[in-house]
Image: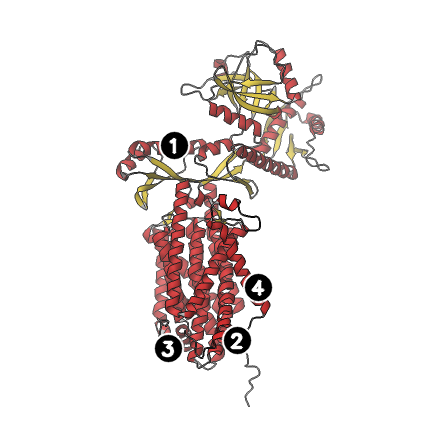
Amino acid sequence: MPVQFIPSDTKIPFMKARHVAVIMSIVMSIASFWLVYDRGLNFGIDFEGGILVELHAEDDIDLTALRSGLGELGLGEVSIQTFGSPDDILIRFQRQEGEQEEQKTAVDHVVAKAGEIITSKITVRRVEYVGPKVSDELVTGGIIAVALAIGFSMLYLWWRFEWQFGVGAALSMVHDVALTMGLFAVTQLEFNLTIVAALLTIVGYSLNDTVVVFDRIRENLRKYRKMDLVELIDLSLNETLARTILTGISTFLVLFALLIFGGDVIRGLTAAMIWGLLIGVYSSVFVAAPVLPALKLRRETFDETAKTDTKP
Amino acid sequence: MLAFTRWQTILIIAICLIGLSTTIPNFFSRQAVESFPSWLPSKQLNLGLDLQGGAHLLFEVDTNAVIKDRLEALQDDVRNSLRPKGADRINFTRMRVQNNAIHFDVTDVAERPRALEAVRTLIGNTGSGFNPGAPDLEVATEGQSGIVVRMSEAAVAQRKRAAVEQSIEIVRRRVDELGTREPSIQRQGDDRIVVQVPGVQNAEDLISTINTTAQLSFRMVDLTASVDEAMRGRIPPGSEVLEAVDAQGGEPTHYVVRKRVLVSGDSLVDAQPSFQDGQAVVSFRFDSAGGKRFAEATRNNVGRPFAIILDNKVISAPRINEPILGGSGIISGNFTTESANKLAVLLRAGALPAPLKILEQRTVGPDLGADSVTAGTTAAIVGTIAVLIFMIVCYGWFGLVANIALIFNIALMMGGMSLIQATLTLPGIAGIVLTIGVAVDANVLVFERMREEIRAGKSAIAAAEAGYTRVIVTIIDTNLTTLIASGIMFYLGAGPVKGFAVTLTIGVITSMFTSVYVTRLIIATWLRRARPRTLPI
């Protein structure tokens, strides 16, 4: 027999907490923007340009020795970090003055120097070079993509529902993006091109959640024409609660599997999506829904039978 | 909603079976698939470079250099046309190439009409023939005493386009010569070329093979001036100082060579690496016109040295011992077997019309790729099993139905991607795994709705019916909004984002199909057969 995790007749007064929640959301969003501004994001070479070399050694690597050794090469700031395991490292340094030849020489020097310092056999697993022109374009492309995704979804909801729904969804998406960027500013996890994909997916998932709630609100607006709007939103949130949580859990299960088993290359992507999943669920309940009464959603639009319902 | 016509049923089952069958090749090795009978599907998932290892390179064709080169060559002709033989020369100052045009000032304004006439005649003679009907070059006066020879916008665009197309062709020939497996060479935007070569270990070699301009020329060494004098700036007119190709270490050697080209690399029809006296050399053959010119030049210059120049560097400057009449010869220099082979490849493929600049390079070693595939597959399998168990725990028999749909969904996704040969990247695998989690959303919506309807007192069939009817709008709305986001990702995204968007899009479409049609068909059939009084949900 199936287990029902979420009781069927919850009556959680979500909307009672809406003022606190909205204030908290605004504070968190502003804090995130400020953190991004103040601490900055740890941009990967996709956005900042530069050179990245991933090396694999057969034994653990002495990072301190490697750091000072590579520092002597005069390539500017060289960042070295282990990648997943202590015998796997990422070396990042800036684009070198000059043309292709200089970049190649720099990579050769780094690999040769690393070979001297690391006693065990090393293999080059990955080399990436992103020029300044491309990285600028990727930044612009990323920003436009996120903005367009939010804009088009807002228009779609405006068309399918009412403008208040569009605005509510857009605000909750901005909130999700802000908080995710905030997470990256706090943790200083690398912010690269795949994170933009994660942002867009977060926007998509959060929107999914929001639309489910909005759909139920619309249905209830037609069903209970006398009910107070706030009460009605609470009812709708409770009715969709089981779905919100179950889908959330199932998505979390796969993302968790991806986080544990998916390897280091996409760990940042997965971490961002898990965070976004939590934020997205929160924002559809506490950001998107409270916007409706705040924007004075007019109920008459949903009274399809109102015109024929003439009073005696 | 629960009634299906016979045709609908057949169609749904057929799509599922086709989906399953198109995934089959992915469970076999490439060799095994090639031996499949022809009626079996044979397309495998197209793994991105991050999964199979290889090099991704983005180049930009420096199209401005093409225009500049052309105008600089023309500048010499213009200069000569103003100093005609047997007539008075026209004095001018400040001749320069600027903004797709040659500018100069005539010293004596009264001479300007004659200068205009001379330049016009010259241009009439050179007539480039790119745009019949519209002249490539326009001659006009400017300012008090200036004359401008401007290349028309159409001609500039035309030349740039031609340079990019020609570059792609030459890059293709060069990469093909390397004999790597399935290289992909594509144009991106106006002036960019993406080269993807799977399985390449050393991208640096590949890059230098691709972006060496490889302009070869044979010119005479100028013996009228010593190198030392020329280095101090006293270069005879019509000559220039060029460096020799790097010998191992030491000070670079210089040569004073004539600017006039005896024969250029364009006249080559073949080049092969070979050996002479145990030394690696490149032997070459000219076409008949080139051979004749080379024969004449060598006949007139026996005893004097000539220079073999590649991309403005002197490879060697041998003495002409006797006229070379056969139209073929050898280039010797400090070659190793490899460098001789590489030069031969470059010469055979032809010179690039413009320099190529590398903008982006991503190389992934084959073992990292293999590790990523293993990691992605493990995550997908573990994630799928977790969701399957979760659904059965939550919804029992209905969960099982949703699971069947989920399996078909995964099959359809893999099949769809194999069929359209979309590239599967590592973020793409993440996209698939995410879709597996989200795919059950539609079923969760339906099942939760059924529970509500049962609580509202509806019969089994009515509840099942209402579950689908009421929820279909929500499912469409949610999936369309996801499609909007993934569509934007596809159009604007680069590389990994695009791969992610493709799998997400395919996943949304297939999951809508399986979670709406497949589960509904199974549940409808079950309701008809079992006639339950209550829904076990």
Q: CA distance from mark 3 to mark 1?
A: 67 Å
Q: Which mark is residue A108?
A: 1
Nearest to the observer: residue B84 or residue A297: A297
Q: Which mark is residue A9?
A: 3
- Of circles 1 and 2, the one toward us is 1
Question: Considering only order in the chain, which callout, 3 or 2, is on the residue closer to the N terminus?
Answer: 3
Nearest to the observer: residue B294 or residue B262: B294
Q: Which mark is residue B11?
A: 4
Q: Is residue B100 above or below residue B27?
A: above
Q: Amino acid at mark 1?
A: Asp
Q: CA distance from mark 2 to mark 3?
A: 29 Å
Nearest to the observer: residue B337 or residue B196: B337
Mark 2 — residue?
A: A301
Question: Considering only order in the chain, which callout, 2 or 1, is on the residue closer to the N terminus?
Answer: 1
- Of circles 3 and 1, the one toward us is 3
**Position of residue B61 measured from the top left corner of the image (x, y, whole percent):** 54, 36
